[in-house]
Every structure is written in C-alpha cells, then in structure tokens.
Image: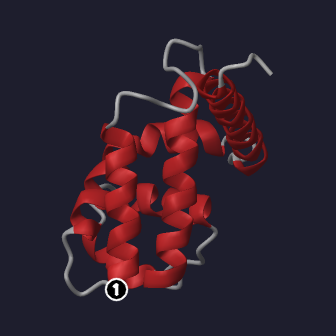
Amino acid sequence: MTGAWWGDLLVSIAAGLILVWIALITVMVFARPRGGLLAESLRLLPDLLRLIRRLAADPALPRGVRTRLALLIAYLALPIDLIPDFIPVLGYADDAIVVTLALRSVVRHAGLEPIRRHWPGTDDGLTALCHLTGLKRTDR
C-alpha cells in the first residue's frame, strides 16, 4: 500500500489491464488458424472487409449478427490493436484472427446463404472463407 488510495487504485487498474491483455493474447495464440490458414486469411482481408460491411448493412440478418459485425468494424477502425502493428507478422495477424473468430460466429448464426449472396471475391476466395470458418459448402 502506498498510503494514497487513488494511487493504489491506479496501480490495481493498470495491473488488471495488463493481465486482461495477456489473457487475450493467449486466447488469440490458441484460436489462430492453423497451418497456411493464417496467410490465407491475410490474403482474403480486403474481400472480408467488404463482406463485413455488406453484411452489417443487410436488414434481413438478425440484430445480434449485425451487432457483432458492427463491433468488428469498430475494432478494425480503432488505431489501437491487441498487438501493435509494428511487431512483425503478429502485428497484422491479430486483425486476421479477430476477423476469423467473428466470422465463425456470424456464419454459425446467419448461415451460408447471406455470406454467398454478399461475397465480393472469387469462388476460390469463398471456398477459402468456408474453410477458415469451418462451414461446409453444399454447392460444389
């Protein structure tokens, strides 16, 4: 104890934030796509960003799905990342991992049809997206 309660409070808040940050990094390390999927997700990022924007604007999707997408857009727009972008590979990989996790949730709740309808990229890109999110394509 430092004697000043506000000083102790600030130290406690800082320590808590550091612990939460470490926990998030640990979760991202275990939740990241395996093998070549991380590189594949980085390659798909421009198409994924357009897909996210289109899905978030689709009033036919459930409100919870659109809320997840809006939060994802806000995360991507913020200049603060879980892992700073100046760290090689991991700096940009955290965005790809967060997008992948959010899309897995969206795909599981919305299904494949809205994804297929709004996908701006190639058919190979959609196949890669299905592979990333664990969704089975039935149209092949």
User: Does 119 sit left or right of 108 as displayed?
Assistant: left
Quarter of the image with the N terminus in it: top right
User: In the figure, is residue 8 to the left or right of 81?
Assistant: right
Numbered label tally: 1
Circle 1 packing at 10 Å, graded few (<14), some (14-19), many (20+), is: few
Residue at x-position 32% and y-position 48%: 74
Residue at left 40%, top 42%? 45
Left or right of 73 on screen, residue 2: right
Q: Position of residue 58 (x, y in %)?
A: 21, 76
Q: Can residue 115 be seen in the rendering of this structure?
A: no
The residue sitting at the front extreme is 3
Coordinates of residue 119 in the picture (x, y in percent) = 30, 64
Left or right of 11, for residue 64: left
Looking at the picture, how far across and down is residue 116, in whole percent?
A: 35, 74
In the foreground, 57 or 126: 57
Along the viewing direction, whichever of 3 and 57 lies nearer the viewer = 3
- Residue 121 sits in which quadrant? bottom left
What element does badge 1 sit on? loop
At 54% from the left edge and 54% from the top edge, which residue is drawn? 100
Q: Name above or below for residue 129 compared with residue 134.
A: above
Residue 87 versus residue 40 in the image, above or below: above
Residue at horizontal 58 percent and vertical 64 percent from the top:
133
Q: How is the rendered protein coloured?
A: secondary structure
Say which of 64 and 92 sits in front. Answer: 64
Q: Is residue 33 visible?
A: yes
Identified by mark 1, the residue type is: Pro
x, y (%) of residue 134?
A: 64, 69
On the image, numbered disc 1 is attached to which residue? 62
Q: Residue 78: which quarter of the image? A: top left
